[in-house]
Image: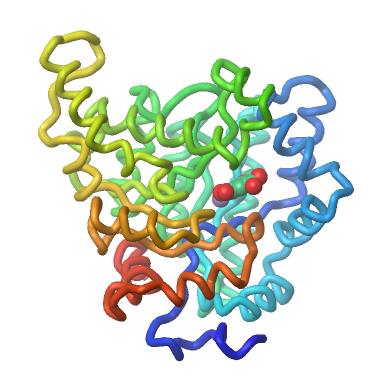
C-alpha cells in the first residue's frame, strides 16, 4: 500500500467508490452460451465476446477481478485507498437473457451472493440489487427483498432491456417499488441495442468509449421527458460517467425541449412541471466513474450542485491508482471534496 493512498480517512474523508462491478460465473456462462447459439445481440458479442474469451491481459485480469468478492478485491481496494465499494452485478446484468425464469434465478442468486459478501465485510462492501426487468412484477418484489432482507441500498439497471426503455408503462412496478422502499435507481450503461449499434460498432465505438454514454444518456432523457419525476417526485436516479454527457448538453436540451413542447411536435412530448435542468438539480445524481477529470467534475458540480456529484472508480474496468491521486489533488475546498468522496454517497445511498 502506498502511503498517500491509505484508507481510513487520513485525508479528511473516506473514499466511497459508487460504481463498482462484480460478476457471477453462471452469469458469464449464459453470456457465452448466447454468443455461441446466436441469441446474443451485437453488443453482447462485442463486449462479452471480448472480456470472457480474449487472452489479452486486460480481459483476463478483469474477469479474475470481477469474479472475486473477497480478499483479492479488498487488497486492490487497500492498494488504491478505497474505503468502501458500492457493488453491483456487472452490465448487462441478466437483462439480455431470453429465458426469463433463468434470468430471475441468476439475478436472485447474484443478489444472495452479494448480500453474503456485504455481510462478511460490512465496513467495506455495500450492495445494490439486480433485477430482471423482463418481469417487472418479480423485479418489484426483488426490490422489496433487497431493501428489507438483504440490506441493499438501491438497485442498478443496465439501461435498455432487449431494446426496451424504462419509460414504457409496463416497467412502472419497478418505480412503484423503489418509491415504496425509498431507494435510488442507478442506470448503468449497456451496449446499445441492435437498432442503434450499427454505425458505432463498425468504428469500434460501441462500448465504454462512446456507445455506452450515448445510449444511457438517451435513456435518462427518455425518462425525464416522459415525466417520471412528475409522477415520482422523490425518486433519485443516478448515472455514472459524469452524467453521460447530459450536463454539457443541458442548455440545448432545455431550449429544444421547450420549443418542441410548445409546437406540439411530438405526441409523446408533454409539458412538464420543471425544466430538464431543474430535474437534474432535484432528482438526478452523478458519479465520475471513468472520468477522473477535474474540469468535468467541477463543471458538473456547478451545473447540478455540489451535493449531487459523487466519486466512483468503476473497478475493475478502470482500476488506476493515479486517478485516485488526481482526485485527491483536485483544487477544491476541503468541504466540497469530502462531499464528493464521502458524504454525498452516505446521504443518497442512506448508508
Ligand atoms: C466497461 C466499462 C465495461 C464500464 C463495463 O461493464 C463497465 C468497459 C461491462 O470498459 O468495457 O461497467 N464502465 O462503466 O465504464
Ligand atoms: Mn461501470
Q: How is the image coloured?
A: rainbow
Instruction: Give the total number of marks visible in the rendering.
Output: 0
Q: Could you tell me residue 327's position as x and y percent? A: 46, 70
The residue closer to the viewer here, 109 or 341, is 341
The residue positioned 79% from the left and 59% from the top of the image is 61
The residue positioned 38% from the left and 58% from the top of the image is 295
The residue closer to the viewer here, 138 or 325, is 325
Q: Is residue 111 left or right of residue 186?
A: right
Q: Is residue 342 above or below residue 246?
A: below
Report the quarter where the C terminus lies. Answer: bottom left
The residue closer to the viewer here, 73 or 297, is 297
Task: Determine which quarter of the picture holds residue 75.
Answer: bottom right
Q: Could you tell me residue 57's position as x and y percent? A: 83, 55
The residue positioned 39% from the left and 54% from the top of the image is 296
Q: Could you tell me residue 283's position as x and y percent? A: 24, 47
Q: Could you tell me residue 37's position as x and y percent? A: 82, 22
Q: Is residue 7 left or right of residue 167?
A: right
The residue closer to the viewer here, 202 or 106, is 202
Q: Is residue 214 above or below residue 78?
A: above
The residue positioned 34% from the left and 76% from the top of the image is 338
Q: Is residue 189 above or below residue 25?
A: above
Report the quarter where the N terminus lies. Answer: bottom right
Amino acid at each position: 500500500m502506498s502511503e498517500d493512498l491509505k484508507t481510513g480517512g487520513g485525508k479528511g474523508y473516506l473514499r466511497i467508490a459508487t460504481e463498482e462491478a462484480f460478476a457471477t460465473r453462471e452469469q458469464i456462462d449464459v453470456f457465452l452460451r448466447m454468443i455461441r447459439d446466436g441469441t446474443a445481440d451485437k453488443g453482447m458479442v462485442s463486449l462479452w465476446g471480448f472480456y470472457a474469451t480474449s487472452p489479452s491481459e486486460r480481459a483476463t485480469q478483469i474477469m479474475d477481478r470481477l469474479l472475486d468478492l473477497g480478499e483479492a478485491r479488498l487488497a486492490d481496494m487497500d492498494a488504491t485507498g478505497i474505503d468502501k465499494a458500492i457493488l453491483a452485478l456487472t452490465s448487462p446484468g441478466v437483462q439480455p437473457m431470453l429465458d426469463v425464469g433463468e434470468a430471475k434465478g441468476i439475478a436472485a442468486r447474484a443478489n444472495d451472493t452479494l448480500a453474503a459478501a456485504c455481510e462478511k465485510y460490512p465496513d467495506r462492501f455495500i450492495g445494490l440489487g439486480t433485477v430482471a426487468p423482463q418481469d417487472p412484477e418479480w423485479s418489484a418484489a426483488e426490490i422489496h427483498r433487497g431493501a428489507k432482507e438483504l440490506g441493499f441500498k438501491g438497485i442498478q439497471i443496465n439501461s435498455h432491456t432487449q431494446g426496451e426503455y424504462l419509460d414504457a408503462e409496463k416497467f412502472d412496478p419497478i418505480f412503484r417499488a423503489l418509491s415504496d422502499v425509498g431507494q435510488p435507481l442507478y442506470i448503468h450503461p449497456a451496449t446499445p441495442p441492435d437498432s442503434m449499434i450499427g454505425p458505432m460498432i463498425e468504428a469500434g465505438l460501441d462500448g465504454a468509449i462512446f456507445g455506452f454514454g450515448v445510449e444511457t444518456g438517451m435513456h435518462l432523457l427518455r425518462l425525464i421527458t416522459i415525466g417520471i419525476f412528475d409522477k415520482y417526485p422523490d425518486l433519485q436516479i443516478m448515472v455514472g460517467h459524469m452524467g453521460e454527457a447530459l450536463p454539457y448538453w443541458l442548455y440545448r436540451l432545455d431550449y429544444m425541449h421547450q420549443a418542441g413542447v410548445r409546437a406540439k411536435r411530438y405526441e409523446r412530448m408533454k409539458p412538464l412541471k420543471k425544466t430538464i435542468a431543474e430535474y437534474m438539480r432535484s432528482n438526478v445524481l452523478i458519479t465520475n466513474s471513468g472520468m477522473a477529470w477535474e474540469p468535468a467534475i467541477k463543471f458538473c458540480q456547478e451545473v447540478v450542485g455540489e451535493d449531487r456529484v459523487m466519486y466512483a472508480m468503476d473497478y475493475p474496468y478502470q482500476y488506476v491508482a493515479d486517478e485516485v491521486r488526481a482526485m485527491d489533488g483536485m483544487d477544491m475546498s476541503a468541504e466540497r471534496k469530502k462531499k464528493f468522496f464521502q458524504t454525498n454517497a452516505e446521504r443518497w445511498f442512506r448508508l
